[in-house]
Image (tube, helix red, strand yellow):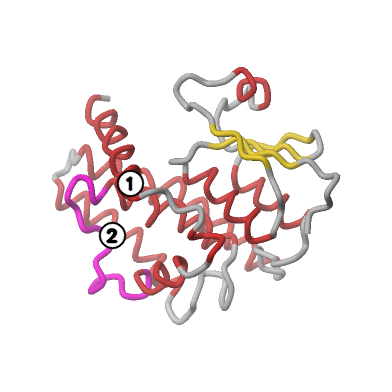
Amino acid sequence: MAKKEEEVKLLGFWGSPFSRRVEMALKLKGVPYEYLEQDIVNKSPLLLQLNPVYKKVPVLVHNGKVLCESHLILEYIDQTWKNNPIFPQDPYEKAMAFFWAKVIDEQVGPVGLISVVKAEKGIEVAIKEARELIMFLEKEVTGKYFFGGEKIGFLDMVAGSMIPFCIARGWEGIGVDMIPKEIFPELNKWIKKLEEVEAVRECIPNREKQIEHMMKIVEQFKSA
């Protein structure tokens, strides 16, 4: 547990999968923190001061130390508060967790939403390409409760915040059932297990509000 004298602040945005996953970790660890909601369009002087390089959320401040980038923040949280570990102890398994996290954030997200919205090769081709990527995750979670095994871990937080609780709301908004149960039975079982975890459930954005937010992003992609 966090010591009373420790100061933990998180600058985030309610609809950001990157800051939501950090909240999941803090809640799972039982770390008290002050949450500072940010306007990601009209960025606050505090955000610009703390993250002058990327000017993005999330930003974690722990006893005056500033950390940016969600993967790094999650690793720092796991190494600072040892209870309820979220990273594998095995070096290879930890490296592979980072690998799949990069795939999710850099490939599944962009291909899964942007390419489907733009549909430059046609909507059916875009959906097929996105599903081919997502199928790798289906295979990774097959036979497990979570990507991390019996308990929720780093990769579950990354994948959960990005796929079912973010871009899936965008797919829903444009009328695309990207991860149907008949094609992705294991992922759908995993999503249900994820929703049973209190630390995750508390960080899931309101569905209607998130769909509305994602549709604004969709319109931005279309006009870009």
User: Horizontal placement of 98 versus 32: left or right?
Assistant: left
Find disc 2 in the rendering and name its residue: 131
**Circle 2: residue type:** Arg
Quadrant of residue 154 in the image?
bottom right
Q: Is residue 155 above or below residue 70?
A: below
Quadrant of residue 139 in the image?
bottom left
Q: Along the line of sight, which residue is nearer the eye, 119 or 209?
A: 209
Q: Is residue 74 above or below residue 34?
A: below
Q: Residues within 10 Å of mark 2 (few under 14, many from 20)?
A: many
Find disc 1 in the rendering and name its residue: 111
What whole-number distance in Å separates the C-alpha atoms at marks 1 and 2? 9 Å
Q: Residues within 10 Å of mark 1 (few under 14, many from 20)?
A: some
Residue projecting furthest to the bottom = 143
Secondary structure mainly formed by the magenta segment: loop
Q: Earlier in the sequence, mark 1 or mark 2?
A: 1
Tag 1, which secondary structure? helix
**Circle 1: residue type:** Val
- State the extent of the magenta-drawn residues as a range: 171-187
Q: Name the residue at 73% across, 42% down.
A: 8
Tag 2, which secondary structure? helix
User: Horizontal placement of 84 versus 102: left or right?
Assistant: right
Magenta span includes 146: no
Residue projecting furthest to the front = 4
Q: Position of residue 219 (x, y in %)?
A: 24, 31
